[in-house]
Image (cartoon, helix red, strand yellow):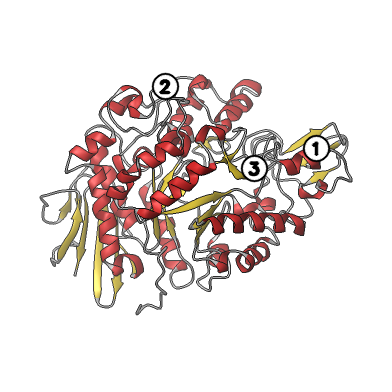
Amino acid sequence: MSNGQKRTWWKEAVIYQIYPRSFADSNGDGIGDLGGIIEHLPYLQELGVDVIWLSPVYKSPNDDNGYDISDYQDIMTEFGTMEDFDRMLADAHSRGIKIVMDLVVNHTSDEHAWFVESRKSKDNPYRDYYIWKDAKDGKEPNNWQSCFSGSAWQWDEATGMYYLHCFSKKQPDLNWENPKVRDAVFDMMTWWCEKGIDGFRMDVISMISKDPAYPDGEVKDGIYGDMSPYVCNGPHVHEYLQEMNRRVLSRYDLLTVGEAAGVTIDEAKKYASLDGKELGMVFQFEHTDCISQGEAVVGKWNHAKPKMPAVREILNKWQLELEGKAWNSLYWDNHDQPRAVSRFGNDAAEWRVLSAKMLATCLHMMQGTPYIYQGEEIGMTNMHFTGIDDCRDLEEINAWNQYVVDHKMVEPEEMLKCFDAIARDNARTPMQWDDSSQAGFTTGTPWIGVNPNYKEINAKNALADPDSVFYYYQKLIRLRHANPVIVYGTFRPLMMDSETIYAYQRELEGKVLTVACNWTDQEQPCDLFEQGGEELISNYKEHKAGVLQPYEARVILK
C-alpha cells in the first residue's frame, strides 16, 4: 500500500464475538452450546463476518463462566464434546468463517491438575507453577485487591501459605517466571493450532509478568490497595510474548489480539508492532472507561454516560499514534462491557436504531480490525436489574457484598443503577433470536434472564426489515471488504471543536473518505458534505443541507 501498510487477512477481516453460554441452546438445558453455534452459522454467514472469536469453551467448573479453566484440551460438558467442536470448526471453515480461540493463561482454575498438585506440598514438582508467598505480619503478603473485590491472596491450609489470584480465589495465577509453565502453555497452543484454529484472543495477557517486589498498592476505596501498576505490563511481559511468537505464533497464519489491561500507547506499540515480533493487535480500555473524575460511585462502579468529546479524544489518539507503528482493534462492547447502544448511544425506542447505526458507522470506518459482539448487530440493549438476585456475574455479586452488604459504602439503589449502566451481565443476557418464549434462545429455563424487550428487538424481526440494524452492519462489512481506503487509509481528525459531531477523514492512493456522526438527538450544523461525492452509507435516506439530523451518520467517498 502507498502508506507503507503490509496487507494481511486479519487487518481486512471483521470479527464477531460469541459468548457461548448466551448465544444459542440446542438441547433445552438453558445454557448455550456448540450445537447452538452450529445451527446459527448461516446467520453469521449472511451477516458477512470473517471470523468468530469464541469465548472459552474449555473444561471449567464455571466460577467465572469459563475463564477458570480446568483442562485446556477438553470441552466444557454443558457446551458439548470435542467432536462437536471439530464439527463446528469444519462447518465454519466451509462457510469461509475462521475460528479464534480465547486463550486464558494468566491463571487456571484451582481444579486444574497443575494446581491440584501445586497445593499438595511445598516440594511438589508443580509447586512453582503458581505464585505462593508466606504471610507477612500474620496477614496477606500485601494489600492488593483482586479484580473481583476482596484480597488478591488466598490462604491455603495444606501448606500454610498464600497463593495469588488477581481474579476469583478459584483462579490462581500462573507463575510465568517458571520455564516449565511456558513450555506447557506453548505446547497446548501448538495442539490447538495443529487442530486448525485460526488465532487467539489472549485474556488479560498484559498481566502475566508481575513486579517481583510485590509492593503494597495505593489504597483508593479505604479497604484494599490497587495492584494494577504491579501486575500490568510487567518487567518480562514482552520477553514472554516474543518467546511465544518464536515458538508458536510465527509458525502459523494466525490472528492474535491481546486483552491488555492498563496498556499505554507506548506499550501497545511493543505488543502490536508491525514488525510482527509479538501480537497482531491489542484491546485497550481507555474509551470504555471514559468517565470524568468524581463520577465513580466506588471503585470502577459508576452510572455516568461517557461524553463524546472525551471518547473522541481517546480514539483519535490511538488512531494517530499507532498509525504506521502498530495495528488497532476497534470495538464498542464485548462480554465484559455493557451494550454499546445503551452505553454510548441512546436506547430509547425512538432513537435506538438510528444511534446503533451511527455508532457502527463511527467505529467501522476507522483504521483497525472491527469487532462485533453478539446482538450488537440487532441493537440489543442493557438489562434492568431489580435486585442482586437478577445477577449471575461473580464481579457484580462480590462488589455488592463488599460495598453494599459488608462495608455499607453504597446504597442498594445506587449500586443497582451502576449495574444497569456497566455491569457485565448486560452483555450476557441471552441472544434474542425471535419473539417466541425465552427469545428463541432455549426451550428450557435460561441460566440468566432474557431482556424483556426481546419481543421487539430480535434477529427474526431484523432479518424481515430491510432498514434494520442487521442489514446496516452487513453493508458496513461489505464496504470494508470492497474499499482498501477503509482498512488502510491514513486517519485525519475533523471538527475537533465540536461538542456533538465526531468527524474524520481517511485517505489512500488519492481517495478521500469523509465520515461524520451526530452523537445527539438534535440537529447539528455540519458543512463537510457540501462538495459532494459518492455516498457509501448513511442511516438517513434524505439529508438536509448544512446539518446532520439526530444521530445521523454519513460517509462520502471522493
282 displayed left or right of 226: left
- Give x and y (percent) for residue 268: 54, 63
> 511 or 98, which lies in front?
98
- Give x and y (percent) for residue 60: 61, 37
Q: Is residue 423 visible?
A: no
Inspect the image, locate mark 3, and give the three-letter code of the amino acid beneath it: Asp
**Residue on which disc 3 sits:** 71
The local secondary structure at tag 3 comes to strand
Q: Residues within 10 Å of mark 1 (few under 14, many from 20)?
A: many
| Picture quadrant where residue 407 is located | top right
Q: Is residue 103 above or below residue 347?
A: below
- Give x and y (percent) for residue 474: 26, 51
> 204 or 178, which lies in front?
178
Disc number lying in front (3 or 1): 3
At x 70%, y 36%, the residue is 111
Q: Which mark is residue 140?
A: 1
Quadrant the C terminus occupies: bottom left
The tag earlier along the polypeptide, 3 or 2, is 3
266 displayed left or right of 453: right
The tag earlier along the polypeptide, 1 or 2, is 1
The local secondary structure at tag 2 comes to loop
Q: Residues within 10 Å of mark 2 (few under 14, many from 20)?
A: some
- State the separation of the CA atoms marked 3 and 1: 29 Å
Q: Which mark is residue 444?
A: 2
Looking at the image, do the residues carrying marks 1 and 2 touch, with CB atoms under 8 Å apart? Answer: no
Inspect the image, locate mark 1, and give the three-letter code of the amino acid beneath it: Glu
